[in-house]
Image (tube, rainbow, N blue to C red):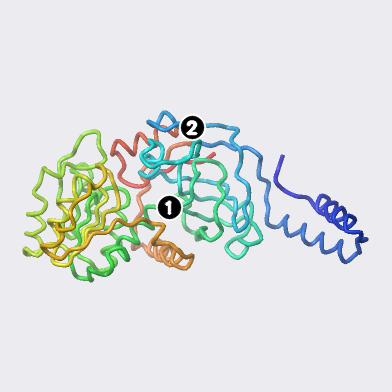
Amino acid sequence: LHTVPTITMMLAAFARHSLKRGAIPTAAAAAAAAAQSSMFLRTFADVPATMTAAVIRETGPSSVMKVETDYPTPKLAPGGVIIKNEYAGINFIDTYHRSGLYKRELPFIGGQEGGGTVVAVSPEAEQFCKVGDRVSYSSVFQTYCEYTAVPGAKVLPVPDDLDMAVAVSCGVQGLTAHYLTHSAHAQLVKPGEWMLIHGAGSGTCQWACQMAKIRGYKVIGTCSKSKADVARATGVDELIVLDEVPGTTYEDYTSVDIVAKVKEITGGEGVKCVIDGIGAATWEIALNSLARRGIFVSFGNASGAVPAYPPLRHIEKSSFMTRPKLNDYSVTREELLERADDIFGWLLAGKLNVSVDKVFDLKDVQLGHDYLEAGKSTGKVLYKIP
């Protein structure tokens, strides 16, 4: 079974509709119906009724993810497209959904970014892409699978000379790094001023360090000893190397007096912005490292969520705090394209380097989450979709 209407089916439907209304189909009307059918054939490729997908029917450890080969293929919605995935990205937020930390309605397919080939386009989405286009997308649920239904306004055209694995890597992590270094700090940090970025050797903050340098900021990075070479390659001005916490995704932030080191580097002033995806282990370090009217940008929970704290903690230096998310910094298609165009342009110009650390086959779906949660990644982790 396929979701592709044929010309015969469309003409038959038109004839039945016309006869019900008491009208006799004319040659012109039949031609119009045929043209409509042709449009459907131009905008649909063969899409099977079922597909292979990594499905979560109960929350818990990585073992709850099961690969099913007969999961229903998503339907084409008005304004949407169907994409045959080549790769799906793995992100920490996927583990939060799988574990139940972030609630989702069960069952669901994991993932929220991917890329591949457009195989179906609704008429409303023809302004964004056509069947056969290479595209990537992010902030769309259910991507650990062969086919994903994506709003047309969220697809990003992938340049012909850009590898699809790299393009998918630009999704959640690349776009997040872009809004963190360009927008979330509300311009409270200016080019030439200091920024502290935790986790410079991992994931999103590898991107953020490079983009901060492109923007003209001076960057202090933190990383574990095992990721020091990766972090240095991002071009940070100063690097604070920490001991490791075995079995975690973050470093031992008590192994070095980071606040004292930051003050030393900045001549006692502190930094104008802290970008922090670590959370519970680093929020006080962030507040104490800020310069006057600096901003603490907290975007992740690798060590646990930042606890509630009194606003009076900010009074010493009239500092700011924000807890942003990507969807609020890609509200319009224009904003999304602006960020993506920057990223793809920097990649093609050689100004930005993307590390695809490891690619797992979808059949090994559990191993992908285990690898990420063990803190082993030094770059983007992906699934190859069959």
Residue 292 found in image quarter: bottom left
Could you tell me which secondary element the residue under label 2 belongs to? loop
Instruction: Describe residue 197's horizontal placement relative to residue 53 as left or right.
Output: left
The quadrant of the image that shows the C terminus is: top right
Report crowding for label 2: few under 14, some 14 to 19, many 20 or more residues within 10 A (C-alpha). Answer: some
Q: Earlier in the sequence, mark 1 or mark 2?
A: 2
User: Mark 1 against mark 2, which lies toward the viewer?
Assistant: 2
**Residue 281 point in image, percent of width and height:** 19, 44
Could you tell me which secondary element the residue under label 1 belongs to? helix
According to the picture, the residue beneath numbered tag 2 turns out to be 57
Instruction: Describe residue 57's horizontal placement relative to residue 202 as left or right.
Output: right
> What is the CA distance from the residue labelled 1 to the residue labelled 2?
30 Å
According to the picture, the residue beneath numbered tag 1 turns out to be 166
Task: Name the kind of residue labelled 2 in the image.
Answer: Arg
Residue 254 drawn above or below residue 207: above
Residue 269 drawn above or below residue 249: below
**Residue 361 point in image, percent of width and height:** 47, 36
Task: Name the kind of residue labelled 1 in the image.
Answer: Val
What residue is shown at x 28% (from left), y 39% (from top)? 375
The quadrant of the image that shows the N terminus is: top right
Residue 288: assigned label: none
Residue 300 drawn above or below residue 62: below
Q: Nearer the viewer, residue 53 or 97?
A: 97
* Residue farthest along the top direction in this orientation: 63
**Residue 55 point in image, percent of width and height:** 50, 35
Residue 59 found in image quarter: top left
Instruction: Describe residue 29's horizontal placement relative to residue 64 as left or right.
Output: right
What residue is shown at x 71% (from left), y 43% (from top)? 2
**Residue 89 point in image, percent of width and height:** 43, 46
Residue 96 drawn above or below residue 12: above
Total numbered labels placed on residues in the image: 2
